[in-house]
Amino acid sequence: MADSVEIESKYAPPLAECAHCDHMLPQGLGEKECKVCGAVCRVSHQPTIDSLTDEALPCPHCNTVIVAGTDERPVEMTCGACMGSFTLTAKIVKVEIDCPGCERTLRIRPRPGTRELKCPACESAFNVTF
Ligand SMILES: [Zn+2]
Ligand SMILES: [Zn+2]
Ligand SMILES: [Zn+2]
């Protein structure tokens, strides 16, 4: 079990928009293909890269603080103190959407394109596009 520990990163790049059609690009850094129009855009965000590279977190096995040293996520980490390993995973970004029917705030994980949401409170269905 010890080698299946996953820790979610504290940092994530801001959600980027396609330069061609303004829809949301898949989350992450590097070359991303727009799911809506197919254009390939380069996503770069130096402050996030710096934060990810410098991200320090306690080892889940022995609490020794480890610095990630890379902006790649997910990445396999091995603790130098206890040799325990764990996976540092990408932070999952969620956005808040207000239900048009009852103004309840829904927290969802955005995905490019259009999809239908159903409000758990008032059961009205509506479309969101990213
Ligand atoms: Zn596009
Ligand atoms: Zn450790
Ligand atoms: Zn609602």
Image (cartoon, rainbow, N blue to C red):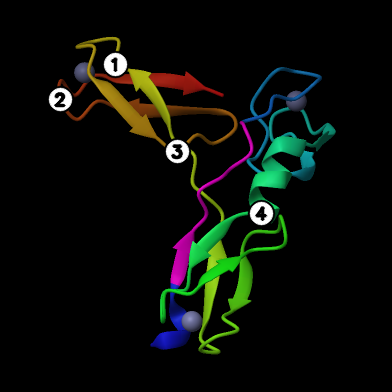
Question: Which residue is painted at 64% across and 38% down in the image?
Answer: 13
In the visual, does 25 lie left or right of 108?
right
User: Decide: marks 2, 1 in contact (CB < 8 A)?
Assistant: yes
Tell me residue 3's x, y (percent).
48, 85
Q: Is residue 28 above or below residue 6?
A: above
In the visual, does 37 lie left or right of 108?
right
Q: Is residue 57 above or below residue 91?
A: below
For the residues labelled 3 and 1, the Cα–Cα distance comes to 15 Å
Question: Which residue is painted at 60% across and 75% down in the image?
Answer: 77
The residue nearer to you, when weighing 4 against 32, is 4
Q: Earlier in the sequence, mark 2 or mark 1?
A: 1
Label 2, on which residue? 121
Report the amino acid beneath label 2. Answer: Ala
Q: Which residues are magenta?
A: 6-14
User: Decide: marks 4, 1 in contact (CB < 8 A)?
Assistant: no
Label 3 or label 2, whichever lies nearer to me, is 3
Quadrant of the rendered image holding ligand 3 = top left
Tell me residue 80's x, y (percent).
60, 84
Callout 3 secondary element: loop
Label 2 C-beta lies within 8 Å of the nearest ligand 3 atom: yes
In the rendered structure, find residue 109 and report the number of the disc placed on it.
3
For the residues labelled 2 and 1, the Cα–Cα distance comes to 9 Å
Label 4, on which residue? 54
Label 1 C-beta lies within 8 Å of the nearest ligand 3 atom: yes
Q: Earlier in the sequence, mark 3 or mark 2?
A: 3
Report the amino acid beneath label 4. Answer: Asp
In the rendered structure, find residue 99 and report the number of the disc placed on it.
1
Tell me residue 113's x, y (percent).
58, 29
Report the amino acid beneath label 1. Answer: Cys
In the visual, does 31 lie left or right of 88?
right
State which quarter of the image contains the N terminus. Answer: bottom left
Q: Earlier in the sequence, mark 4 or mark 2?
A: 4
